[in-house]
Image (cartoon, rainbow, N blue to C red):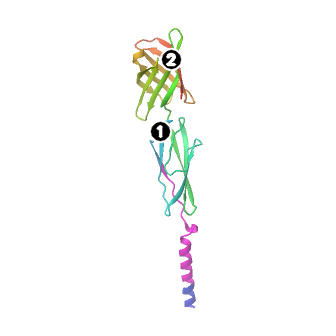
Amino acid sequence: MRRRSWAILALLAVTVGTLTGCALFNQPPVANFTWTPSDPLARTDVHFTDLSTDTGGIVSWSWNFGDNGSSPLQNPQHKYAKSGTYPVKLTVTDGDGSSKTLQKIVTVKPSLDGVWTGFIVNPGNVTDSFQMNFHHSSSSISGTVVYASTVLNASSISFDEVSKVVRFEVASMGIRLEGTLDAAERRITGYWYVLGAPAQGFTWDVTLQ
């Protein structure tokens, strides 16, 4: 009787040991990720880094960036067309077919980054072509404008993320420009003003290329 009991126990031990390596006893992965910069701007690269873990190893990644964008890469990068709050989801799957999904919220700020072309209206209602070339990072905004085929420096550039009002000066033209980024964040319209004087000039209007 004792021999039979020991034989049964040995068989159970072998069976459990075998099943431990199967999917029945597999622990699902732990999904996790981060991104840089932590406060990204629209139309600039957001780098996502997978921090997920699994005892047996993760074999696939599925990203949903919350704006209809997706990626199967482990550490992808993505650009958002406009500002907003995006629910980013990462689903990781291990070699045994177990998967786990994690969602985090990425808040994207509006941006002036890019090339904007349009027109500026001068005294006498003369309409001339006008182009803005801005580089917008989390720490600064720099840029130039092209007017009459001449590249001119823009200075004192400011941008309010809430009101979406942009202001900058073009000293060589003797004007300050003020405009508002539209809801789609692809067009800026406003007026220019004479530097050192309260006089309001005519309009200017540019669209993101």
| Nearer-the-camera pick, 118 or 191 | 118
Within 10 Å of disc 1 (Cα), the crowding (few <14, some 14-19, many 20+) is: many
Toward the viewer: 203 or 59?
Answer: 59
**Residue in the foreground of this view, choosing between 150 and 30:** 150
Give the label on residue 40, or none: 1
Give the amino acid type for the residue marked by disc 1 in the picture: Pro
Q: Residue at x 57, y 88 (%)?
A: 4
Q: Closer to the N terminus: mark 1 or mark 2?
A: 1
| Residue matched to label 2 | 191
SS of the residue at dot 1? loop
The secondary structure that most of the magenta stretch takes on is: helix
Residue 76 visible in the current orientation: yes
Is the residue under label 2 in contact with that under label 1 (CB below 8 Å)? no
Label 2 environment density (alpha carbons within 10 Å; few <14, some 14–19, many ≥20): some
Q: Is residue 112 visible?
A: no
Q: Dividing the picture into quarters, in which one does residue 37 lie? A: top left
Quadrant including the N terminus: bottom right
Instruction: Note whether 91 is above or below 86 in the view shown.
Output: below
Q: Most extreme residue toward the front, as rendered? A: 149
Q: CA distance from mark 1 to mark 2?
A: 29 Å
139 sits to left or right of 23: left
Residue 154 spot, x, y in % from top left: 41, 23
Does the magenta portion include 9? yes
Range of the magenta residues? 8-33
Query: Is residue 197 placed above or below 146 in the rendered structure?
Result: above
Residue drawn at point x = 57 percent, y = 61 percent: 98
Q: Name the kind of residue labelled 2 in the image.
A: Tyr
The correct choice, above or below, for 98 with respect to 109 in the image is below
Q: Position of residue 155 (x, y in %)?
A: 40, 23
Q: How many marks?
A: 2
Residue 117: % across, % down: 52, 24
Q: SS at mark 2?
A: strand
